[in-house]
Image: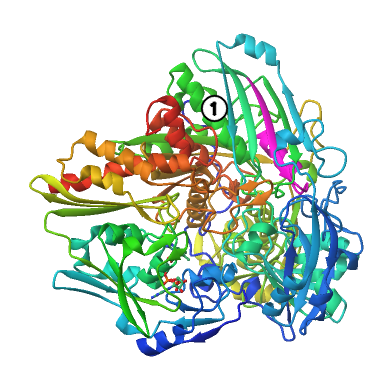
């Protein structure tokens, strides 16, 4: 039905010499040679070591907390409990500069009376050595009186359920009312209904949370920390009761974030201890601390009831979603909203009904995680598509093709897509790349699966997102970029350098980026929501373009030609049609400098601004734009033991424009691994709220032994809102992987496991249900 | 992590035995040997153990290495999983032991983890143990008052309890080279392919005599408080020509020989299912190699 993809390829406004090339990222040599200094590599003279004492129960009343013995221990400098703090909260807002009203149930900084989740902090310790801090933690005495808790979001909604906080357990609700659901179901010839479940997931970044804080001579609290969001300085200042300009966050290269460093982690603890002691304080989480120290991916229960015609056209879909928000609100409302927007998937469906809620429990709180609700939505809609295809006896790809959104079609929330929708192209290419099917061998069955998605890039449009960057040209024609953006390992900084290098005609090595300092670099906003390249890339583009205009203008004067006839490349300015008419960029910059021509530019990029969606219908614009793509896999399933081997894994994504294809491939490969863990082996298991999987021997991320070679297929529609038509790949790379694997397993064994992770045991049990008399018992 | 203990690093076996001699009971305190540390350090961090003194075995080179002579394989207690993988002849005699080393932990752990440490950790999921049990291995225990040899099948007394007297050091693990018409296999079922704790471990060793199964050994890991031999299932195979029906019946018997628990990795029911499926598979494969 879709035919050839619309040709979106815009003539780029510059002749791309560096953008689109797989250059060695600027962060690579330092990392490869071990020279990069992460937040944990920084130490200061006279520094103290901190430790957080956490509650070993999920729901309890703190009836006694006595730190006297810990304080008496020689070498222990400070122990803070809630009694020592003003009753302030760690504000949970969507991070950054929105100034939105705080949500009602922000987290207490330390437990004052009520413990709401396993691991909630009871006390902070600063001591001369880490060993002393740990010993002090053992000496703090406390009594916890168990209180009834609630550990399942469905239970939490029942009358009489224990209330986690406030008046009820509903943290957020969203609904969509689009078209006429009844008419849609009346038109349907089949109705397919299924319920899909997902689990708590841990980010498992390489670098656990770590930071170093000190109070400087101006009473400014400086915090060097591993974070995705330096703009948290405001929330930290509020929590401390100081002015916003009295807190400074210095980022470092971040050893992975995936949303787990999107909320405040160690910053407030560090600041409080540095304030209290007047000495520098370092806090480094162990892996175990980290498992307790940041929110997890929301488990969702999602039901799809889909009406479809015999020839595979979806006429209506009714979706319900229940997410476990855990003990505190954090970003749950936003995660829920993203799940709703992505709910039906990348399909044009005119009649849509969605009811979604996030519910408080005494489980670990849940918050941002790569894919941010849309990933959970994808797990459901893509498995549902396969189930519908099975029901209709239709090819799974063909069913998708008959329903894919196209440019101009409205998504569930009523926004009409303006950019390219290359879902079909991506799906077709990913599927074809699977090549020849592996042979089956006895009990080992082979299966294939594909999944497609609709993933936003950029933040919610009513948050009025902006990003700033400063670009300057030095007298020797080297380039400096200053921007607050945090680099969380995906090459965010390198991409900015590449954009500046492209526009100013210098090599990547001639650009230095200073980033991630809330006091001295222009604020760029968060490295979250697949927005860093889109937002800050555009800001750098704006600034560099302005400079480029000035340089070219002055060079044109010098050459006696029109500015449109001049280009910059290889550190020279030259006349395009007469390249022998040229001058070194250094000389041009020298002229500019002596004439007082401004050699720097501070630019702000503004995303589209809108009001909120209609609360009754859910209609309105939510995001700037969406990315589309597909992931396909082939698996082998041992039907006797249930073991799954992923044999092939292919991601094909329209990234708009790849700034650095090597970095894009890195995202696709990482997404394939993280998504494979989500599908098959990763689960944070909480039993009555207590974490049963507190280390990497229980929480199983895929190893090199588990991963096939991942193939990355990069499509470029140049239709995105980012620099040079870029969309984004950070989150999209992950989103379709788990459902593709789920579909492949179902294809292999002829049964579906409706709950992630699809463990060997669940596969065996699903097969046994099919044949009740098989097996020894 | 903090832990207070003295560390002694003896140069000779006698010094080591002397240093250990004062050790009080296995338990969690007192004096304990330290080999690769891949269990000990984890246990110290988790505060499952609190020894007052550790006796590091790192300089006792005599305790490391594999010697094959006079029909016997003799392996020093400090032999690592990587040593097993590197040995040129072991794969011929004991593919089950080599296979378990291949799927043991990750490379860094394999470089440090010793065979005696694996046995003495007492974990029912210890991967070297099923293969060694199926090979009828014996262990040598030493103390200043002398040495004694204990069959591995009698070494484990219960969950984390074994036949070592206080202060006794394991110095050697040895077994007879399996006869010509024999075959041994190992399979580790875990929740991922690299570096994972075993959910069900199965080792099988068969020897054929005149077209029949002469001896049979089936050892099962992670399905009982100790790594266990399925002796009733073994008995069903001995002296028989193995048919698919008989193998299946023995595999079902093996399920009755074990006593798995539910834990976060798997249910007891799933473990029983896999004991059946994997025992059947490994016995079939071992038998196919003999016929
Ligand atoms: C990441 C990781 C992965 C792992 N993967 C696996 C795996 O796949 N399979 C598996 O089975 N295990 C695994 N383990 C557990 C561990 O590596 C093994 O049990 C290993 O064999 C222990 O040997 P070691 O030399 O490190 O023992 P140590 O930790 O040094 O000692 C373990 C215990 O044995 C005692 N001991 C050591 N040597 C002697 C001796 N000669 N005589 C008497 N007592 C002694 C010690 O006192 C201690 O109680 C893993 C551990 C880690 C950390």
Determine the image quadrant of residue A474: bottom right
Coordinates of residue A756 in the picture (x, y in percent): 54, 39
Determine the image quadrant of residue A90: bottom right
Is A49 left, or right, of B278 in this rendering? right
Q: How many numbered markers are drawn?
A: 1
Which chain letter matches label 1? A
Residue A341 magenta: yes
Seen at 62% across and 51% down, the residue is: A723
Is A33 left, or right, of A195 in this rendering? left
The image shows residue A149, relative to residue B11, as above or below, that is above
Dot 1 surroundings within 10 Å: few (below 14), some, or many (20 or more)? many
**Where are the magenta residues, as a range?**
A317-343
Is A208 left, or right, of B136 in this rendering? right
Is B251 left, or right, of B240 in this rendering? right
The image shows residue A475, relative to residue A62, as above or below, that is below
Residue at which label 1 appears: A384
The reply to whether residue B99 is visible in this rendering is: no
Coordinates of residue A521 in the picture (x, y in percent): 74, 67
The image shows residue A717, relative to residue B147, as above or below, that is above
Seen at 67% across and 48% down, the residue is: A529
Q: Quadrant of ligand 1?
A: bottom left
Pick the residue in front: A214 or A183.
A214
Residue A365 magenta: no
Q: Residue furthest front?
A: B145
Coordinates of residue A478 in the picture (x, y in percent): 61, 73
Pick the residue in front: A114 or A50.
A114
């Amino acid at each position: 039905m879709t035919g050839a993809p619309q040709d979106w390829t815009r003539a780029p406004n510059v002749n791309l010499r560096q953008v689109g090339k797989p250059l060695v990222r600027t962060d690579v040599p330092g990392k490869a040679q071990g020279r990069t200094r992460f937040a944990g590599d920084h130490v200061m003279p006279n520094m103290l070591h901190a430790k957080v004492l956490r509650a070993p129960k999920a729901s309890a009343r703190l009836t006694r907390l006595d730190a006297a013995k810990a304080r008496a221990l020689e070498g222990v400098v400070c122990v803070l409990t809630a009694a020592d703090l003003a009753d302030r909260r760690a504000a949970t807002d969507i991070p950054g500069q929105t100034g939105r009203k705080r949500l009602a149930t922000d987290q207490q900084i330390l437990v004052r009376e009520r413990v709401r989740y396993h691991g909630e902090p009871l006390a902070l310790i600063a001591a001369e050595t880490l060993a002393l801090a740990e010993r002090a933690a053992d000496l703090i005495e406390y009594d916890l009186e168990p209180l009834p808790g609630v550990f399942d979001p469905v239970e939490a909604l029942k009358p009489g359920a224990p209330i986690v906080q406030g008046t009820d357990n509903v943290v957020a609700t969203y609904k969509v009312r689009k078209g006429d659901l009844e008419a849609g179901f009346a038109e349907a010839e089949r109705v397919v209904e299924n319920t899909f479940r997902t689990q708590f997931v841990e980010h498992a970044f390489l670098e656990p949370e770590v930071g170093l804080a000190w109070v400087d001579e101006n009473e400014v609290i400086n915090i060097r920390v591993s974070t995705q969001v330096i703009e948290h300085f405001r929330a930290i200042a509020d929590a401390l009761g100081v002015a916003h300009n009295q807190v400074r966050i210095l980022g470092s290269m971040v050893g992975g974030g995936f949303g787990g460093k999107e909320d405040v982690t160690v910053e407030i603890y560090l600041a409080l201890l540095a304030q209290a002691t007047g000495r520098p304080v370092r806090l480094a989480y162990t892996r175990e601390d980290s498992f307790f120290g940041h929110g997890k991916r929301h488990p969702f229960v999602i039901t799809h009831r889909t009406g479809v015609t015999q020839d595979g056209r979806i006429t209506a879909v009714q979706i319900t979603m229940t997410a476990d928000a855990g003990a505190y609100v954090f970003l749950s409302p936003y995660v829920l909203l993203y799940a709703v927007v992505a709910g039906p998937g990348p399909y044009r469906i005119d009649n849509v009904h969605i009811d979604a809620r996030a519910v408080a429990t005494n489980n670990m709180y849940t918050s941002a995680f790569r894919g941010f609700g849309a990933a959970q939505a994808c797990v459901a809609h893509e498995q549902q598509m396969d189930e519908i295809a099975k029901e209709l006896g239709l090819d799974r790809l063909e069913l998708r093709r008959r329903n894919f959104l196209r440019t101009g079609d409205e998504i569930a929330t009523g926004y009409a897509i303006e950019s390219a929708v290359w879902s079909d192209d991506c799906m077709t290419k990913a599927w074809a790349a699977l090549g020849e099917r592996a042979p089956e061998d006895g009990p080992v069955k082979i299966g294939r699966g594909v999944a497609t998605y609709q993933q936003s890039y950029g933040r919610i449009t009513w948050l009025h997102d902006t990003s700033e960057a400063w670009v300057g040209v030095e007298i020797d024609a080297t380039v400096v970029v200053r921007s607050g953006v945090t680099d969380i390992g995906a090459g965010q900084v390198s991409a900015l350098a590449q954009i500046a290098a492209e526009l100013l005609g210098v090599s990547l090595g001639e650009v230095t980026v200073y980033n991630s300092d809330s006091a001295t670099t222009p604020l760029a906003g968060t490295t979250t929501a697949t927005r860093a390249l889109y937002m800050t890339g555009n800001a750098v583009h704006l600034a560099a373009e302005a400079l480029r205009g000035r340089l070219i203008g002055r060079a044109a004067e010098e050459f006696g030609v029109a500015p449109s006839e001049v280009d910059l490349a290889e550190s020279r300015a030259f006349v395009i049609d007469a390249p022998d008419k040229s001058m070194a960029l250094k000389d041009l910059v020298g002229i500019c400098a002596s004439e007082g021509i401004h050699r720097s530019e501070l630019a702000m990029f503004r995303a589209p601004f809108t009001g909120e969606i209609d609360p009754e219908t859910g209609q309105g614009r939510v995001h700037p734009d969406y990315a589309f793509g597909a992931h396909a896999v082939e698996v082998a399933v041992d039907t006797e033991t249930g073991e799954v081997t992923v044999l092939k894994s292919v991601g094909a994504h329209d990234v708009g424009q790849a700034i650095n294809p090597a970095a894009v491939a890195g995202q696709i490969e990482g997404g394939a691994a993280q998504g494979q863990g989500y599908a098959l082996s990763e689960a944070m298991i909480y039993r009555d709220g207590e974490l049963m999987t507190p280390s990497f021997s229980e929480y199983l991320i895929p190893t090199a032994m588990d991963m096939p070679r991942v193939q990355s297929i990069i499509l470029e529609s140049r239709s995105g809102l980012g620099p040079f038509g870029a969309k984004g790949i950070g989150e999209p790379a992950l989103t379709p992987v788990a459902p593709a694997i789920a579909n492949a397993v179902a294809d292999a064994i002829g049964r579906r496991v409706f709950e992630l992770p699809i463990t060997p045991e669940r596969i065996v049990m699903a097969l046994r249900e099919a044949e009740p008399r098989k097996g020894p018992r | 992590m903090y832990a207070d203990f003295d560390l002694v690093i003896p140069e000779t076996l006698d010094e080591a035995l002397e240093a250990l001699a004062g050790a009080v009971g296995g338990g969690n305190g007192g004096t304990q040997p330290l080999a690769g540390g891949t269990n000990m350090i984890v246990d110290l961090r988790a505060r499952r153990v609190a020894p007052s003194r550790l006796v590091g075995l790192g300089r006792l080179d005599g305790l490391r290495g594999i010697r094959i002579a006079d029909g016997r394989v003799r392996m020093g207690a400090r032999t690592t999983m990587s040593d097993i993988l590197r040995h040129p002849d072991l794969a011929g005699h004991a593919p089950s032991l080599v296979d378990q080393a291949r799927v043991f932990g990750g490379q860094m752990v394999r470089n440090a983890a010793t065979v005696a440490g694996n046995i003495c950790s007492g974990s029912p999921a210890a991967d070297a143990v099923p293969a060694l049990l199926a090979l009828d291995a014996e262990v040598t225990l030493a103390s200043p008052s002398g040495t004694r040899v204990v069959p591995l099948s009698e070494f484990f007394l219960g969950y984390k309890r074994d036949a070592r007297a206080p202060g006794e050091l394991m110095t050697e693990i040895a077994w007879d080279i399996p006869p010509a018409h024999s075959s041994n296999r190992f399979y580790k079922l875990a929740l991922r392919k690299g570096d994972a704790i075993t959910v069900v471990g199965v080792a099988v060793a068969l020897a054929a005599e005149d077209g029949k199964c002469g001896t049979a050994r089936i050892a099962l890991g992670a399905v009982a408080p100790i790594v266990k031999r399925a002796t009733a299932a073994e008995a069903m195979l001995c002296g028989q020509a193995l048919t698919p029906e008989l193998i299946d019946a023995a595999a079902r018997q093996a399920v009755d020989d074990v006593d798995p628990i539910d834990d976060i990795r798997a249910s007891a029911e799933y473990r029983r299912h896999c004991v059946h499926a994997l025992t059947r598979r490994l016995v079939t494969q071992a038998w196919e190699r003999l016929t």
